[in-house]
Every structure is written in C-alpha cells, then in structure tokens.
Image (cartoon, helix red, strand yellow):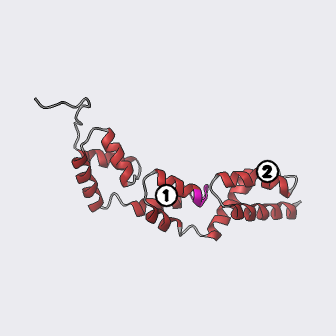
Amino acid sequence: MPRRSSRPQPQVPALDAGFRLLARRAHSRVELRRKLARRGYDEDEIAGTLARLSELGYVDDAEFAARHVRRRSSSVGPLALSAELAARGVDRNAAGAALRVFDRGSQVAAATKLAERLCGRKPPAGYAELLDGVGVKLLRRGFSQSVAREACRAVWARAAGTS
C-alpha cells in the first residue's frame, strides 16, 4: 500500500502557482523553490517549473539582483544590500555584479541624502554629535565607515555654511 503524504496535494499546477507568485513581486530562483515546496509541489515539478520560467525570462537572478540594488540603494549601503541578496538566495557572482554599479560616488551621494534626512530640520550641535548619531545609523544601514564619515562631513559643511 502506498504511503500517503500528510500534506495535501496542490490543486493548481506548479507553473500557475509560479506565475501567481511572480505577479505579486519578483523572486529569485531560491525564493520560488522554497515557496513552491512549502505549497506541496514535489522537487521534479518545481525543477521543471523553474526551468520553464527561466526559459520564458521570468526568473533571472542577475536581473533580480540588479533591480533590487537599484530599488534599495537610496536607503541602504552595499553591505546591507549584499546581505539582503544572500538572504534571498542570490549567488555571490550575481550579487557582486549587481553591486558593482553602486560605486563609491553613488554610495556617498545616497548616504549624504540619507544623512540629511536623518538630521531632520534641526542641525546637530557639532560634528562629533553628527557622527555619533547619524554616522552610526549609516553604518547600521550597511554603508562603510569611510562613506558614512564623508557623508557626515558633507552634511556638516552644509549646516555650518548655512548657519
């Protein structure tokens, strides 16, 4: 007698489920694999679905990573972006290629804009206070120490120039 799975079999073909998931937002291959497996599809069906979705151009980890970096680079730094991509199952090569477009100049510009926003309307009392408050927040958001310092310097120069 065949052994029955405790999980009910899905009513919808895996390809349809994949299209529904992708209609909500873009997914990496690993994310789609996990979600389809959680829905009860077997590994062969998932593999076939992922192959077909890739063939049709709906699943492309390099493009997914590039879009993710473009969308999130105004609010987080490359270290955080790298961690986010790794958590979504994007391999290091695709993540690295996507992050290469986020060069140092772009990082400083994004960090400076973010630092201005984090300062609010009230300028800090001193540069050290700015570094302790805003600089630390930039570090937590994945910007390097040198980028955070440069952004804080730019904000401080503007604040000092307008006072």
Q: Residue at x 43, y 57 (%)?
A: 90
Q: Which residue is mark 2?
A: 121
Instruction: Specify which label sits upstream in the sequence, 2 or 1.
Output: 1
- Circle 2 Cα neighbour tier, 10 Å, few/some/many (<14 / 14–19 / ≥20): few
Q: Residue at x 81, y 63 (%)?
A: 158
Q: Residue at x 28, y 54 (%)?
A: 50
Q: Nearer the viewer, residue 60 or 94?
A: 94
- The amino acid marked with disc number 1 is His
Q: Nearer the viewer, residue 17 or 148?
A: 148
Disc 2 to disc 1, C-alpha distance? 30 Å
Q: Is residue 21 magenta?
A: no
Residue 56 can be seen, yes or no? no
Q: Quadrant of residue 63?
A: bottom left
> Outermost residue, left direction?
1
- Tell me if residue 112 comes above or below residue 122 in the rendering: below
Q: Main secondary structure of the magenta part?
A: loop
Helix, strand or loop for disc 1 = helix
Q: Which residue is mark 1?
A: 68
Residue 141 can be seen, yes or no? yes
Q: Which residues are magenta?
A: 73-79
Which numbered circle lies on residue 160? none
x, y (%) of residue 77? 61, 58
